[in-house]
Image (cartoon, rainbow, N blue to C red):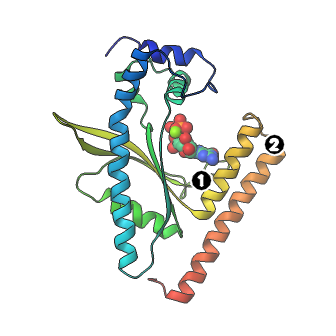
Amino acid sequence: MTTEHPGLSELARRPAADSVSEPFGAHGFADVNKFLLVYKFGLAEIGTKINILAEELAHRGRGNPIEHVSPRLKTPASIAAKARRIGCPLTFDDLRARIRDIAGIRIVCGFVPDVYTVARMLTGQPDVRLVVTKDYIAEPKPNGYRSLHLIVEIPVFLSDRVVAVPVEVQLRTVAMDFWASLEHKIYYKHDAHVPAGLRAELAAAAEDAARLDQRMQRLHQEIHGPRG
Ligand code: GTP
Ligand code: MG
């Protein structure tokens, strides 16, 4: 489809906070749901891979490196809002090509090395194609945000074709997740205008979280040995 989709343009005109479940015309609604379907399948595929890794690693008796996993599908309203923000035309072809985080999954691990182990195991699978890596653990964002972000492509087998579906994978530790959740809340509470003092405190809190990660890792190694 190359013309702007009426359902999506209508959504884009509305305020971003508009209800996402509100239908935008029966025709538009069905089209958007169809567009989102492969992303839902991609998320299911990657979710299965992660569950298999978690369960198999737990059976190996060295403990499960994965604490919890949360998948999410971007809502039509937030897809339209992001498209508007990045100047992406509201056609399905453009959205498909330019918005790579319609399907997203967050993997929260116990320790920093677990993050890289899980990332390596996932991207090492022959049907997973690693497209982009952003390592905000090695290079934290100026606000202190830490996580390992991957965009991977995973094949989804439909009745008549195979689609390579992009999925954004965010990997982080419990401490990084704790910080990111609260930072997100504060950010939104201040409508993105966080006062400078608070920004500095948030960055310092991120350093504290990173130190806590190091400390827990050291304790873990003392108890279980360096390869524990
Ligand atoms: P988006 O357009 O937001 O997807 O950003 P991007 O394409 O530049 O990608 P990036 O990898 O920087 O961030 C993608 C996602 O990571 C965001 O949608 C958030 O879920 C998360 N994220 C990135 N930066 C921050 C941050 O500073 N704080 C929090 N809490 N989350 C963040
Ligand atoms: Mg995003």
SS label for mark 1: loop
Give the residue number, with chain letter if any, for mark 1.
Answer: 140
**Percent coordinates x, y for residue 114 in the rendering:** 47, 68
Residue type at mark 1: give it.
Pro
Q: Which mark is residue 196?
A: 2
Q: Residue at x 52, y 67 (%)?
A: 112
Residue nearest the observer in this picture, 97 or 133: 97
**In this picture, is 90 found above or below 106?**
above
> In this orientation, does residue 144 appear?
no
| Place of residue 141 in the rendered image (x, y in percent of width and height, measured from the top left) | 61, 48
Left or right: residue 53 versus residue 187 is left
Identify the image quadrant of residue 165: top left
Mark 2 residue type: Ala
- Going from N to C along the chain, the mark reached first, 2 or 1, is 1
Q: Is residue 197 above or below residue 90?
A: below
Disc 2 element: helix
Mark 2 residue CB less than 8 A from any atom of ligand 1: no
Residue behind label 1 places its C-beta within 8 angstroms of ligand 1 = no
Residue 42 position, x and y percent, is 34, 44
| Nearer to me, 218 or 47 | 47
